[in-house]
Amino acid sequence: MGKPYLEDGRQWTARDIGLSHRTCAWMTHGFMSVNTNIGAGRAFLRSLYRQYADWGVDFVKVDCIFGTDYSPEEIITISELLQEIDRPIILSISPGTAVTPALAENISDHVNMYRITGDDWDNWKDVSSHFGVSSSFATAKKIGATGLRGRSWPDLDMLPFGWLTDPSVNQGPHRKCNLTLDEQKAQMALWSMTKSPLMYGGDLRNLDDSTLNIITNSGLLKINHYSRNNMEVPALEASY
């Protein structure tokens, strides 16, 4: 059985470290921030991430801490606590709503991945909105900038391919991706050129051949992994 945290001659509990006025923008009844300005708050987070490390976890996604929920103190504290662990754990943060290169400049050193857009689903309006965002972060030289124990990467969100459900639906009904094959190829190409983390958003148990061919395209995977200094360039068209 665990025991209450002791500091300054008193016991500290969850009630003492939770910031009830700082709730998650998209789930106000489920999450709140931790007060990292007190020892008890840091002790709770330290014990949490050490437990993850003991379990063999190597990737942590922390939501409600960036973008419209920006909490730099928590981001930096979590980053510092992960550096105390004797092996790397990838730190990914979100949401990406209203994120700009200027905001990313403040935290990219402390993380490995950070969302730069809202949730991406399988419609061309969502996909096409990522072109301008990708260009601005490339121009700001944020792709592959210094990060936690290595480098950091702007995250364009999941690839909504294959067998999906609708947003906010947990158990179906399921359906095929609404993007055309060409639109899926364009999305995979943009994500690869931007060197975004490639996270598959469909059901791997129902993976069709055309989707598998897109997400395993060796040329795009090499671009995603090995390319450097990627940026937008003007295209000149002329007739002779």
Image (cartoon, rainbow, N blue to C red):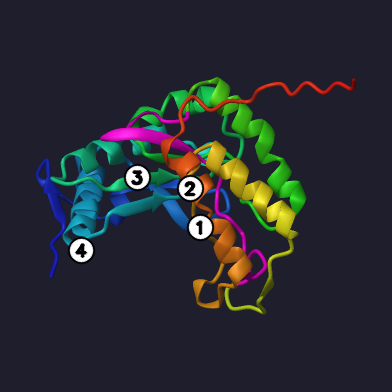
Give the camera-side residue of 62 and 20: 62
Residue extent of the magenta highlight: 143-169
Q: Is residue 23 above or below residue 80?
A: below
Instruction: Give coordinates of residue 157: x percent, y percent.
Output: 55, 49
User: Hey, what amino acid is under mark 3?
Assistant: Leu
Q: Nearer the viewer, mark 4 or mark 2?
A: 2
Q: Nearer the viewer, mark 4 or mark 1?
A: 1
Quarter occupied by the C terminus: top right
Neighbor class of circle 4 (other Cα within 10 Å; few <14, some 14-19, many 20+) is few
Q: Which residue is mark 1?
A: 216
Label of residue 221 in the image:
2
Q: Is residue 167 magenta?
A: yes
Task: Tell me whether circle 1 and circle 2 mark residues in contact (CB < 8 Å).
Answer: yes
Task: Tell me whether circle 3 and circle 2 mark residues in contact (CB < 8 Å).
Answer: no
User: Hey, what amino acid is under mark 1?
Assistant: Thr
Report whether residue 162 is seen: no
Q: In the image, what residue occupies the spot 19% across and 58% down?
A: 51
Q: Nearer the viewer, mark 1 or mark 3?
A: 1
Q: Earlier in the sequence, mark 4 or mark 1?
A: 4
Label of residue 55 in the image:
4
Q: Earlier in the sequence, mark 3 or mark 4?
A: 4
Q: Which residue is mark 3?
A: 91
In the figure, is residue 56 to the left or right of 129?
Answer: left
Inter-mark Cα distance, 4 to 2: 30 Å
Instruction: Give coordinates of residue 189: x percent, y percent.
Output: 61, 44
